[in-house]
Image: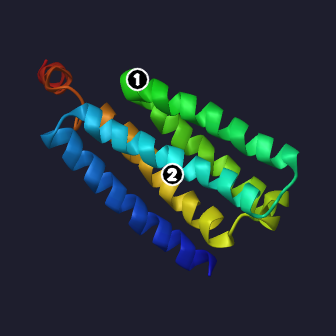
């Protein structure tokens, strides 16, 4: 089951990446980034729903809300500022998924399928953001032209 969930997460991550890439290239970078931020909020916010639905302790629910606030703030910084904030938020989310909700005490209320599939999903999305912006594949056209010009000199 573990491998199947990882594969499913990677497939879902690839679908999000394709959508974000196409939005960035054809509608504008802010739309591609906005899609990635919206999905980040869904990914981190789901744990609040899992904790509330399982009637986990108030401390657990507070921890989940804190998680949304921290990673959500990083995502919002990545929306208008450096996209690497957004990449970092996605990469850090893996620490919430695997050690805390798959191996740790959060396993009592978080579905295994969610915690495991998020590992591949999150890391793939984080890698896409870093690679796409580092290579100038997305972002402002001026930034892409600057990258190309710097490679030619």
Residue under label 1: 82
Q: Is the residue under label 2 in contact with that under label 1 (CB below 8 Å)?
A: no
SS type, badge 1 = loop
Q: Is residue 56 above or below residue 11?
A: above
Q: Secondary structure at mark 2?
A: helix
What is the quadrant of the C terminus in the image?
top left
Residue 103 x, y percent position in the rendering: 79, 63
Residue sitting at x 47%, y 24% = 77
Q: Residue at x 19, y 34 (%)?
A: 28
In the image, is residue 93 above or below residue 74? Answer: below
Q: Where residue 133 sits in the image (x, y, percent)?
A: 31, 33
Q: Hey, which quadrant is residue 62 in on the image?
A: top right
Determine whether, in the image, residue 52 is placed left or right of residue 11: right
CA gap, disc 1 and disc 2: 18 Å
Residue at 29% across, 47% down:
20
Q: Residues within 10 Å of mark 1 (few under 14, many from 20)?
A: some
| Front in this rendered view, residue 129 or 147 | 129
Q: Nearer the viewer, residue 106 or 56?
A: 56
Give whichever of discs 1 and 2 has the lower sequence position: 1
Q: Position of residue 87 (x, y in %)?
A: 47, 37
What residue lies at 13% left-to-right and 23% top-to-bottom?
A: 145
Question: Is residue 22 visible from the viewing direction of this image?
Answer: yes
Colour scheme in use: rainbow
Q: Which residue position is annotated with label 2?
A: 123
């Amino acid at each position: 089951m573990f491998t199947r969930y990882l594969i499913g997460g990677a497939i879902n991550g690839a679908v999000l990446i394709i959508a974000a890439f196409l939005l960035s290239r054809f509608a504008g970078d802010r739309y591609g980034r906005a899609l990635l931020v919206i999905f980040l909020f869904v990914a981190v916010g789901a744990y609040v729903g899992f904790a509330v639905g399982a009637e986990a302790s108030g401390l657990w629910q507070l921890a989940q809300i804190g998680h949304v606030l921290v990673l959500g703030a990083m995502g919002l910084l990545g929306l208008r500022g450096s996209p690497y904030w957004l990449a970092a938020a996605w990469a850090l989310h893996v620490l919430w998924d695997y050690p805390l909700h798959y191996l740790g005490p959060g396993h009592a209320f978080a579905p295994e399928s969610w915690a495991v599939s998020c590992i591949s999903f999150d890391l793939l999305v984080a890698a896409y953001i870093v690679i796409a912006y580092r290579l100038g594949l997305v972002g402002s056209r001026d930034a892409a032209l600057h990258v190309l010009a710097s490679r030619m000199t």
